[in-house]
Image (tube, grey):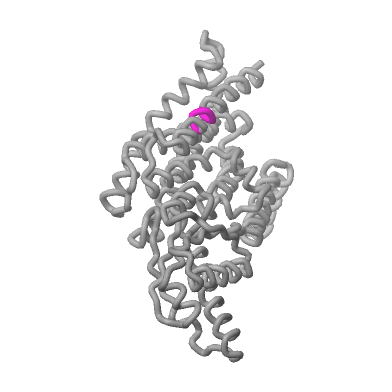
Amino acid sequence: MALRRVLWIAQSVDTRLVRDVRALWAILLVPVGTLILLGCVIKNSSADLTIALVLADDKWSTTTAASNVEDALRSEDVSTFRADGREAAEQAVRDGRAHGFVVVDKALAGAVLSGDEGQVTVGVAGDSLSLSRRTLEAINGALVTASLRVFQEATGVESDTDGKGVKFDATYIYGGQDYGAWDHLAPALLAFLPFVSMLTVALVQFTARRAQRSMERLMATALRRGELVLGHALGNGVIAPIEVGALLLVVTLILKTHFAGNLSAVFILTTAGSLAALNLGLLLSFFARSEAEAMQMLPLVVVPQAVLSGVIFPLETLPGALQTVARFLPLTYAVSALRDVMIKGDGLLDPGVARDLVVLVGFAAFFAVLGAHTLRREVA
């Protein structure tokens, strides 16, 4: 083995790489951009929690305990409001106006004012595992803080009980204690995996046809540009429902995932997200000159979708500017709709799910129309 020849080959590779501006941008932009994006999300991710308080009666002990709990929650930067009954509090959670609720009754008043051991009734949404945990932690911290503060004000000495008299009887509006980490992650993965798969297939396949000059021969026929794009979309689109069906079989029969909603709704929504990804891949393929460039382009599209669409972080915990960006990503609506169906039990006609489905179909149509226009401009 001659070192000179090895070095000559290495030099030629580096020279070619330096001349390939797109490859250099991909090499630098993907890791640097991903690191910046993740850093911004993780360092600035937060959600302004709101807790509803339900007063069981208007006794002095109840109102005093409620005031102490409210002060303790506000000290933790948690907003509060008083709901007119437990049903109103649960409805506020369903409407998204509250992340949880606390029932201020005899048990809570005894735990806060007297240090008695009581079973306190609290509720959380349950549709997001991380937000539910944060809500329960905030409520627990507030109850402990309130009870210790009352004891110290009454006796003038610090309590050594550490709030041991406070216990939870948590109610989940959606999901429940049976829903583990996998049950909360499954809807996001059902949206993400076929999305990436169909995006990759369309991007690489169409780019390969253009690189092999077969596209030019098709363009010489009587085919219209829109017909060409729609034909590729339909041809590859046959794979989408097959792939989605296979994933659902794995999720239901092998992984035993909890489903609150209808399985057919999950199938329709996942397929709609896949078709949007397919048309997006066709559109992006018009900007790649080779399969290598197509693969370099793929992380630039996939990484923002994975970070900002709710797959990893709940959408409402993102900084405001990134939430705006997320609303322009099709995967955001696929993840949102699947979580509403699988965890909340919503159907296709429920307002949130219906809106997300319409947006996904709109994305698919928009990408197809834009792809046909881009192909026409490129060939002209």
Q: Can residue 250 be seen in this view?
A: yes
Left or right, 35 with respect to 116, comes to right
**Residue drawn 54% across the image and 17% down it:** 226
- Residue 215 vs residue 145, the one in the foreground: 145
> In this image, 44 relative to 166: left or right?
right
Q: Does the magenta stretch include residue 362?
A: yes
Left or right relative to 272: residue 212 = right
Between 354 and 4, the one nearer to me in the picture: 354
Compared to residue 61, the image places residue 53 above or below, namely above
Q: In this view, does 91 lie above or below 154?
A: above
Q: Locate the C terminus and report the quarter of the image it occupies.
A: top right
Outermost residue toward the front in this view: 59
Q: Tell whether 19 sits left or right of 97.
A: right
User: In x, y percent, where is residue 375?
Assistant: 60, 21
Q: Give the range drawn in magenta.
A: 360-364
Which residue: 44% across, 77% down? 110
- Majority secondary structure of magenta residues: helix
Residue 217 in view, yes or no? no
Q: Position of residue 13 (x, y in %)?
A: 67, 48
- Image quadrant holding the N terminus, namely bottom right
Image point (38%, 33%), residue name: 239
Where residue 25 sits: x, y (%)? 70, 45
Number of callouts in the render? 0
373, 139: nearer the viewer: 139
Q: Where is residue 223 in the image (x, y as percent from the top left)?
A: 51, 11
Residue 358 magenta-highlighted: no
Toward the viewer: 99 or 178?
Answer: 99
Residue lying furthest left in this view? 253
Quarter of the figure with residue 175: bottom left
